[in-house]
Amino acid sequence: MISPIPFFDQLWPWLKRYRRALLWGSLWLLLSNGFILALPQLMRLAVAAIEAHNAEDLIFYALLMVVLTLAGSASRVRSRLYFLHTGRRVEVDLRRAMFERLLGCDAPFFDRHHTGDLISRLTNDLTNVRMVAGFGVLSLVNALVVYSMTLGWMLWLSPRLTLVALLPFPLMVLAIKAISRHVLAYSARVQDQLGTLSAYIDETLSGQRSLRSAGFDSARQQAFDALNATYLDDALALARVRALILPVMSVVTPSGMLLVLYFGGRQIVAGTLQLGDLVAFNAYLVQLAMPTLIFGWILTLIQRAIAAMERMSLLLELPPLPVALPAPDNAHCGPAIRLRQLRFAYPSQPDKVVLGPLSLEIAAGGFIGLVGPVASGKSTLIQLLSGRYPLSPGQLEIDGLDLSEIAAALYRQRLSAVLQEGRLFSGPLVDNLRFGAPQLSDAELEQLLERVCLSEEVRHFTAGLATPIGEGGLTLSGGQRQRTAIGRALARNGGLWLLDDPFSHLDVHTAHVLWQQLRPLLQGRTVLFAASRLALLQEADWIVCLEAGQILEQGTHARLVEQDGYYARRFRQERLAQELEAL
Amino acid sequence: MKHDDEIRGRFLDLALLRRFVPLLRPYRRGAITGFALLPAISLVRTLEPLCLQRAIDNSLLPGRLDLLWPIAALLIALLLAEAVLVFSQSWCVQVVGQRVMADLRRDSFAKLSRLPQRWFDWQPSGRLVTRLTNDVEQVGDLFGSGIVSAFGDVLTMVLVLSVMLSLHVGLTLVAFAVAPLLLGVLLLLRRPMRSLMRRLRAQTAGLNGFVGERVNGMAEVQIFGQEQSSAEQFEALQQDYLSAALSWVRWETLFYASVHLFGSLAVAAIIWQGGAQVLGSHISFGTLVAFIEYARKFFMPLTELAAKFSVLQTSNAALERIFALLDEREEAAGMLSLPSGPGRVAFEAVHFAYQPSEPVVRGLSLEVAGGECVALVGETGCGKTTLAQLLLGFYRPDSGRVLVNGIEVQQLTRESLSAQLGWVAQEPFLFHGSIRQNLDADGRYRNDQLWAALERSGARTLVERLGGLDVAAIDSRGRNLSSGERQLLSLARALVKQPQVLILDEATSHLDSDSERRIYQALQGLSGQCTRLLIIHHLALAARLADRILVLHRGQLCEQGSHQQLLAQGGRYARLWAIQTLQQDREKGNA
């Protein structure tokens, strides 16, 4: 069993904010247990009253018991609320902390970690920690209070009987410890097996057609059955050790009671103990049963939370999100850009240089076209300019300043970007257009829609601009998504435009109309436009053809056509294809 | 954000239960034992306080310790019996539950292979995996922690109640005077709690959805500088969640507190009334103590039963989803086996659409003679790959017929189809395991046959490098191999069964020219033995290899003939050829 101490060290900073609530909760818990644990005393007195045939006292004690019970329940409710609410609050705090740290992470971080894995840290793992932060802490404190108070009362009633009654408990602790070791080992195995099973099903589903055409269906089923059988065996082994816990737990208290009955009985007969004392004593023992049962369960909860906290600390140990900076004055001016022997490899594959060495000067307000086959480095260059990948100093200058030294938050305020797989967000269409420019007025929005050729289609939407567009823009067509993304960038009105094949889902005609409308609006902005359709780049100030991360040729459209190289061939091919389209 | 995985199960669903019970049939002995042990356990538990009563009344109060022995011995025996019974019972129930789960997993997995391809197109595979794992796990709870233990709880309560009644009717009535009140409170709490639970689930789903979407769109969030606003939006969702969560905690606490409270009130009532009875010597003191014990034993299962609501609800919902999967309409299985033959292929006026609004194949007819080598060419999206999928029987045409050797594909058994048609997919799929498992999962072929196929596909050196046929050299999905290597192995998989028809879908797109040449030599070697359908983007290859070239355009056959004939026609093919020649010039220029 892993020690829970370091885990609580990790948890404490998050609980600390609510220490007042925890303190109040503990006080109420103390009070509640005080009331509840006074009941056996009253019972003792009631028994004495019965023995003394004193009806008046009996009624008084019974009434007092009712009052105490009510008070106990009420204060128990209060204490539970303090503890459990704290658990939820800690959950919300932790989730906020993790999400905000995620927002500050650079692109290599997201390349390294799968979305599903990150999300599960914010969901499953967090739930496991919350259980301990709320219910776990409550139960631990409660067990502590109940044990110490009960033991106190029991000792006060009869030290000898207390010793006798507690005899079975160490045995139980030993037994539970042994059992829980097995439970942990088996549950780890079962979890692994379940993972294997999931992976196998996932692979089968993905390769379903290949399986079918190869005729492997039955062999696949047999292999699955074998995995399934192994899993069953382990699950049964786990079930067997688990089934041991309950009988052990449920036998402990009664055997304690039995011992008390025997030894206490002898004392009663000898006249050294009152009958009421014995009854009260038994009642205390009963009080111990529940916290003991729950305690065993909490231990397994803590084990799970330890693993979860460890996974969550990946996010929690990141630096917090930096504060927002005001927009720089030059946000709408196109910067001058200089690449100096820029070399780049993705951090996941440091040996594979995907870009460079690349040197290039882009004047402020210039329109640069980027051309090249798949994986030539166009998208990578655009990614680098978006500032999401850390670069070593001296490689990329913006207006004469090294990009690695400019505050990312300031630099990004100058950007308007349409990425290749530009993501939209669920919610109304209008929220997506206002994404980077919340201040946009309705009139400006209308104009924006006009400019990106969307107004006609939006008019036909049932709820117009307020139409919800589903996760990632699911309900829009590919072309509508791209035009929305262009509108979003236009609203942002940055000085540096990064366009990564933004018209790929539009037909040739729409693409041209849109681009013609967009061009005049980009006056004075620096534009980097990676295009698979060369016709859009004819007006570019300069066109760079990349291949394997390096410049293959560069020049104006006219010069490149004249040179009759890669660009010229691509251009002719495109024209022929267009004619073919028209056939 | 709602989807069908959200909980909508009911606490008690008889229709579902009626379907669940037959699943227990193979394990009826275990299940019946599990049930049968419950009365025994309840009995033992109800006997224990009786012993206590006897001990007090007959031995302690009169001061006759010698009489305590037999009672103590009996009590010990009862305790041990309880432990053994509880263990055996929960073991039986677990065994049955686990076995039923294993059966459900097996049946669901088998079901997957009988479902039509179309169905999979609309299923996110993640959700299916969840159905076969998490959902099945939850059904395990339905039997173990659900039905059986609920039955046990009810049984215990009934037994306790009857013993109490037999001990003293009046006192029992006093003890349970609070019961209707408790019931009323529980009923009153149930409705708001359920709707609150739904709200909480929806909000959790909303939070998770938000995180997922922002993580996927992190580039946009950061480039547009929306970190703060995203954090604010997230915070708004969090606050909604928090307020729902806090009030959930309040209701839940109230719920347990009321059960607890009424239990304690019952005890107080017993002492009050019962004490008076003892005073009046109407009942013995031991009876009073036993009564208090019984009241406790009555309210404990009641709390448990209340807690079981949500367990049952969740597992009912899971079971419903699994049954929905098992009820999906299966693909009608063909009965005929394919006669041996040269592998004639024909499409007759075939129409097909993945989605009704977008037809992909539109009234296409074509014929391929046995042993012929035919190339299908055309731009992306013209329906080439779809034709292959129709021929392989993955989809059925909406109208028209697809024939092999004159028999409709959908009338053929799957076994004979997969034995007689070989397919190399555009993105070939390999499975985790050895080369042998990937070529010959059933172990039908001899080593020399496998090696021959590997030799012909040009994968021999690759397999030798990987360490032979039986080393588990391939990662899941063949991730550790390059696309080209996957294509070679996939071709070997198709060749080893010596099919009548071989379909290659851009099968050499990821290969270097050397391997490509080797493969096409192999294909020429099959001339006359096997019909070959090549889906090719590269026209020069089509020109070299194919006896006949079919040009597809928008789901229809627009031209066909030999390379020379088509060039001479000066139509679509000729234009495509011109474009690709420019491309090749460039490649030459590079070299």
Image (tube, coloured by chain):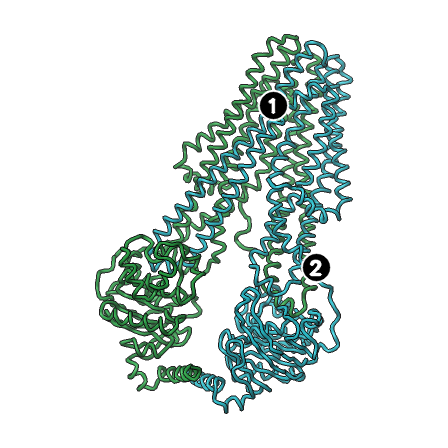
- Relative to residue A451, is residue B461 depicted above or below? above
Q: Position of residue B572 (x, y in %)?
A: 36, 82
Earlier residue among tags 1 and 2: 1
Residue A27 left/right relative to B474: right
Residue B551 left/right relative to B303: left
Q: In the rendering, what colour is chain A?
A: cyan
Q: Name the element at disc 2.
A: loop
Type of residue at label 1? Pro
Quadrant, the C terminus of chain B? bottom left
Quadrant, the N terminus of chain B? bottom right
- Relative to residue A489, is residue B329 depicted above or below? above
Type of residue at label 2? Pro
Asked if residue A442 can be seen in this view, the reply is yes
In the rendered structure, the residue with mark 2 lies on which chain? A
Packing grade of label 1 (10 A; few <14, some 14-19, many >=20) is many
Q: Which residue is mark 1?
A: A254
Q: Which mark is residue A320?
A: 2
Q: Position of residue A187 (x, y in %)?
A: 52, 41
Q: Position of residue A59 (x, y in %)?
A: 75, 20
